Amino acid sequence: MSTRLPVPELLGRDVFAVDEGSPHIVLDPAVCATCTTTPCVAACPAQLYRVGPDGVVGLDHAGCLECGTCRVVCEAGGIVRWTYPRSTFGVSYRQG
Amino acid sequence: MSDDADVDVIVVGAGPAGSACAHRLAREGRSVVLVERGTTAGAKNVSGGRLYTYALEALEEGLTRQAPFERAVVREQIMLVDGDRAMQVSVLPSGDSDPAGVPASVTVLRARFDAWLAGRAEGEGALLATGVTVDSLLMEHDRVVGIVADGEEMRASVVVAADGVSSLLAREAGLTGPLAPASVGVGVKEVVALDAAALEARFGVGPGEGAATLLLGCTGGVHGGGFMYTNAASISIGVVVSPGDLAAAGRTPHGLLQDLKEHPAVRPYLAGGESVEYSAHLVREDGVRGVPRRLAREGFLVTGEAAGFVLNLGYTVRGMDLALVSGIAAAEAVLAGGDLDAAYHAALERHGLMATMRGADGYRDLLHLHRLYGTYPGLALDVATSMFAVDGGPPPPLRRLVRDVRRRHGVPLRGLVRDGLVGVRSL
Amino acid sequence: MPRAVVCYKWVPAENELRLDPVTRAVDTSSARWKVSDYDRNAIEAGRVLAAERGAELVALTFGDAGAKASQKDVLARGADRAVHVVSAAAGSADGHVTAHALAAQVRALGDVEVVLCGEGAADTYAHEVGPRVAEVLGWPVVTNVRELAVQGERLHAVRVVGGDLEAVECDLPAVVTVLAEVGPAPIPGLKAVIAAGRKPGEQVAVDALGLAPDALAPRTVVTRVTGYAAERSRVLLDAGEPAERVAALVSALTETGAL
Amino acid sequence: MTADTTAMPTDVVHVVAEPHEVAGLVVLALSADPTAAVHVMCLGVPDPATAQALTGCGAMSVVVLAAGAPVPSPGLDRPEDYVPAVAERLAGATPGLVLVPATVSGWEIAARLATRLGCGLVSEATSVRRLPDGGWCAERTLYAGAAVQGLEWHGRAVVSAAAGRGGPGALPPPDAGGAGSGGPVALETVVVDRDTRVRVTSRTSRERDAVDLSAASRVVCVGMGVQTLDDLALVEDLARALGAELACTRPVAEDRGWLPVDRYIGISGASVHPDLYVGVGVSGQVQHTVGIRDARTVVAINTDASAALMGQCDHGLVGDLRELVPLLAGAVRAAGVPS
């Protein structure tokens, strides 16, 4: 039996309190549209960055592990806001 | 406390640095508020999982034995991986326990460990406020006078930022700038639950004892490595890779970790285990060069990972011990008063932390040898495989064997010597 | 000073339970504990009510030693005092025992004009303890409440009864059990959390309440707790063009007869 | 629920319910213990048709509790007001199981009766069974449906249960024409004092459209991931294409007010058991999913592949609902799916 687990399966084992109201990471689609390298897509451990049908990178903040990798690799400056989730929201590690 | 301050010190972040700082300050009678955005201390924190205990003893003698650690590390392993092949060096015992029987290093899971440590700080009188995300610093006349959380202000004579590798507060205070992709590794980790007895048998350790394993060559040629630590009833397995190189290599941190778990030399360790958590964390890899020149400004200082106190030595990553020591030093600087930055630097020198950071600088060169991550593990395995291959003929001279392998991997002798020298120098 | 009491339960977070895939045993050992969700709404409703009445708000729980950890949270949520009736046997207590312990402490506090409870706890959701406490105290109870006001010595409430909203009134003292709709439970702010850290919680041994042994004898015994596992095929359609994904879904649904 | 009745003494079950709830609960009582002597206390005077039905419901006796002065205004009566009178009568009656409907009024009645009788309570039991030793055992759900709890007791207890609800989790009805307690009985009406400490001042209907989600064979459910009214319109169109009832999660009805509250599914809302359930933008918290447990096929549509519902569905369609929902509606129509 393979020990290999897809990302959604792994994220399903984590505990999240998703803030439906306000995303803690915000992209500027206009800037992301100019990005050709999209390093965020490969680097995000939770694979939350996806190239949409229009060819522009989009983000689903639910499932964010709050590691900060996207903020570091972003070259185009499309991440116009990067903060931590509001109080009590986001991932909650039970092991860590 | 200045007249309009609510408390003497606000420490932001209840990880090892923040809790150690709050612990020390509270013990010395300062009023301290320790603010943590996780609903419990440790809920947002991730590390490979190994803690060098001298730092815990520096905070308070005898603390290690009270700490909820997972296992005492008695076995060190280095595994070179190439394709389906692997070669492993195992060192036993690892490090000496001190005369009092305190193990030199232990494995920890942060949700448990950090909650305990923050509880110790509370025990000293610090006020722990969990579930509170600090949004920004409160500034007045070019001085940090407090914090803002969800629109609420709180004032303090000093704010200590122990808010981790992505430190938003150190950035806001102007002490640090953006991190370069090359200065960090992205770490991903799974915790795989496993029966304690099975785990002990697989790693060849006794009850309460554990192993620390470093893996090289498992990152698809991307700058980085893997790790495997034994917890009480689980294994922490992960990879740390350079995030900027991933897109070009067509790899993802998640994919590399899944590959590693499937490797024939790794899989038996994990067999029958159940993955119970997936986590990610950035690891500073720029050593002393990543520590900002100024660590404090009026009313503010930065400590722990937020201040770059992390060392990737290749064979081990040190973060929690440096965090603890820097947190203690930060507390001592606050207690000393006067020029915060000068007092802090003096305390860091006194604790030998800056010397450690400087001494480790050479490792950085070693770690930047690209061949370390792809070529050399394969080369070493080829040599080893040839050594163990018996075909009935006379054994080839070892020198020729190495030469053949080296040529096959396209490593010129000059390159090998140069890399070797870098390695020797760095050590 | 008149008092308002909110009863709450300290429960394991249901999303942190681990179910053994084979035995289906429920493992709570790795779960963090929390103040039961709807009890948080009750505390907020109590905070608002107490402020209007100039009353002291007491957050009251019955539980084993572990429930002490809840007191900081309920104080941060606006309780003036946190009282924990401690019983080593709380884990095997049923609604009968819990209600007697809580009611005895309400009596011991004195001057209580209203007791608020969540309609159900996050673990058992039995709609039980609130009306039981009312009966033990001999007070009227209004359950399933979404709106609440006190005027003079009279309580006005709007209950949800099936598809109807029922406006009711009764005299104080009374017990009220509330729904989440009674009002959102705000996340405690920095100062509230810190102020809570400075307030000590109070512990009362259940034996000190002078209850008869019969009041502390559970009537029902929990014989087992097993996890519920949905038997679903869990096929994810996450690759290919949207139209392909939809076509794959439609053909799968047609095949299984769902369409 | 099968009861081994051979070795057990006959027991008594008291059904305490409003007139329209009595018949369903007697069925439950007899399925829990086919040999039981079922005695009914009817809270309020039934209309003639219901009264007629009660005489032949299978109970051994039916006592109608009628309000003494002051008589409540029509429409403002409260079954809860009969608790003292019921408790008084039960205290003097043969002990046994007291069965109460799991309704808002029933929950309160059950807990107050149990307290007045000093006995145990099993709230919202999903099964009740006699034990060979004469004791009882029951099951109920825990953690909003994530777990099942088994309970045992001896002697008297009050049990509340949902009467007349289908699905595998519910108490099954007895065999058609199964044993009753006897033939038709006469209704005995007793005028009792009520507990009038809580007074109803008015009763209004919430915004609702009398939908019976529990009878729907297909349900399309709107979750909080459906973020605009335009997106809601897309989901409504999918429901039309499928011939499905539109439902939602609690916050969509309670917080946003997009749909009437009787269209929300979950622990405090409706339970459904359709052939097909399609959750659009539904995160899948257990408070909701407990209500879809008996759906035959569950489809989840969500941008978030890690949403909890993805782990509890048969088919998980990952992607932007603005794209996928119209495509699915179109494909369903193109396939000529009978709705």
Image: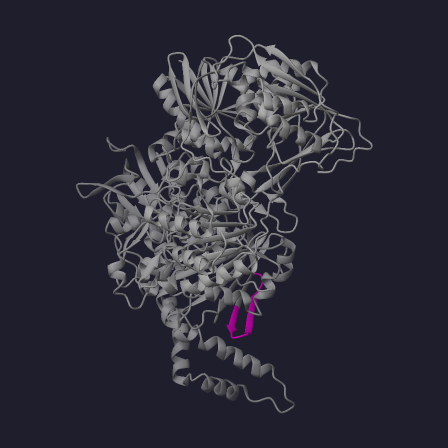
Q: Residue at x 28, y 50 (%)?
A: B170
- Residues A13 and B10: in front is A13
Q: Which residues are magenta?
A: B79-93
Residue D117 forms part of the magenta stretch = no
| Residue farthest along the top direction in this orientation | D69
* Quarter in which the N terminus of chain D is drawn: top right
- Residues B138 and B20: in front is B138
When asked about the image quadrant of residue A68, the answer is bottom left
Q: Is residue B359 above or below residue B234?
A: below
Q: Position of residue D125 (x, y in %)?
A: 62, 33
Residue B80 forms part of the magenta stretch = yes
| Residue farthest along the bottom direction in this orientation | B393
Residue C138 as seen in the image, left or right of residue B426 = right
Q: Position of residue B424 (x, y in %)?
A: 41, 73
- Residues C214 and B357: in front is C214
When asked about the image quadrant of residue C28, the answer is top right
Q: Is residue C192 above or below residue D274?
A: above
Q: Position of residue B109 (x, y in %)?
A: 50, 50
Looking at the image, can residue B52 be seen? Answer: no
| Residue farthest along the left direction in this orientation | B141
Residue C242 as seen in the image, left or right of residue C22 = left
Q: Is residue D96 above or below residue D323?
A: above
| Residue farthest along the right direction in this orientation | D7
Q: Position of residue D242 (x, y in %)?
A: 46, 52
Q: Main secondary structure of the magenta part?
A: strand
- Residues B294 and D236: in front is D236
